[in-house]
């Protein structure tokens, strides 16, 4: 009897040892297009904004740009907070500002892909002048195009005077809430990040200002997928 019990115990042990280990499935790929809606669940932030354009660093890490006020609130920089697309986590805030340069850099998860549409995946750092044609792709307005009316504009945002904006005042370039964070671009590349606007005026932060700020903290930072 003892022998039978011992054999049964040994057989059970072998069964447990031989049981297959359940592997965790890799996260399903998530594709985001420039112009899609992205969200944060922090009550101190705006909540809903627009995905701008993809970026990379010297180590191959991938990022997504949007406006800083979309992820910043009265508590200041909320680095590390989660960002969502259609209720799916896509990454975390790596860098963000809005009182000096209104931008945010989101470090993407490995399964997130930025798709290609009308928004270029390169930056244009050349000279722009009043009258230059530009477009933006917002989650609320879609694609809107118009002309630059003024450079180096000051704006008043959340109790702070923010310098260095570019103004577009044509009716066709008008943005609405939710468009913040959109890529502003021309035929050469992305020239800025839309910060917002009202009464037929849209304001954006030049991409060079974003490069200067993000590049100081993230080695090799540049637009690219």
Image (cartoon, helix red, strand yellow):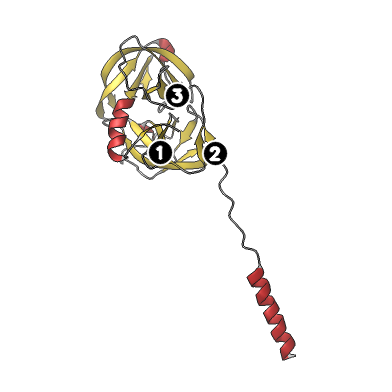
The residue identified by callout 1 is 106
Q: Position of residue 123 (x, y in %)?
A: 38, 25
Q: Nearer the viewer, residue 167 or 47?
A: 167
3D distance between C-alphas at marks 1 and 3: 18 Å
- Residue at (47%, 34%) from the top-left corner? 38
Q: How many marks?
A: 3
- Quarter-of-image position of residue 121: top left
Answer with the quarter of the image where residue 164 lies.
Answer: top left
Q: Residue at x 49, y 31 (%)?
A: 37
Question: Pointer 2 and pointer 1: residues touching (CB < 8 Å)?
Answer: no
Residue 30 is marked as 2
Give the CA distance from mark 2 to mark 3: 20 Å
For the point 31% across and 15% down, which residue is it?
128
- On-image quarter of the C terminus: top left
Q: Residue 182, which numbered label? A: none
- Badge 3 crowding class, 10 Å Cα cut-off, few under 14, some 14 to 19, many 20 or more, is many
Q: Is residue 199 visible?
A: no
Q: Residues within 10 Å of mark 1 (few under 14, many from 20)?
A: many
Relative placement, left or right, of 181 versus 165 is: right
- Closer to the N terminus: mark 2 or mark 1? 2
Q: Position of residue 110 (x, y in %)?
A: 48, 44
The disc, 1 or 3, on the residue closer to the chain's N-terminal end is: 1
Q: Residues within 10 Å of mark 2 (few under 14, many from 20)?
A: some
Residue 92 in view: yes
Tell me the quadrant of the picture where the N terminus can be found.
bottom right
Q: Which residue is mark 3?
A: 120
- State the CA–CA distance, disc 2 to disc 1: 15 Å
């Amino acid at each position: 009897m003892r022998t039978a019990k011992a054999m049964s115990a040994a057989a059970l042990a072998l069964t447990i040892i031989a049981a297959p280990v359940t592997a965790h499935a890799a996260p399903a790929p998530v594709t985001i297009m420039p112009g899609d809606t992205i969200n944060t669940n922090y009550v101190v932030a705006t909540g809903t904004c627009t995905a701008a354009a993809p970026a990379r660093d010297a180590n191959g890490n991938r990022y997504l740009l949007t406006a800083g006020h979309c992820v910043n609130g009265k508590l200041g920089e909320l680095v590390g907070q989660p960002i969502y697309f259609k209720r799916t986590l896509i990454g975390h805030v790596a860098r963000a500002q809005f009182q000096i340069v209104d931008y945010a850099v989101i470090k993407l998860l490995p399964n997130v892909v930025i798709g290609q549409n009308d928004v270029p995946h390169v930056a244009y750092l050349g000279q722009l002048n009043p009258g230059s044609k530009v477009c933006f792709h917002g989650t609320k307005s879609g694609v809107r195009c118009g002309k630059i009316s003024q450079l180096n504009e000051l704006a008043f945002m959340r109790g702070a005077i923010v310098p260095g904006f570019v103004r577009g005042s044509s009716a066709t370039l008008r943005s609405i809430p939710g468009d913040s964070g959109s890529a502003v671009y021309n035929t050469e590349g992305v020239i800025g990040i839309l910060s917002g606007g009202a009464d037929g005026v849209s304001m954006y932060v030049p991409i060079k200002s974003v490069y200067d700020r993000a590049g100081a903290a993230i080695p090799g930072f540049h637009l690219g997928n």
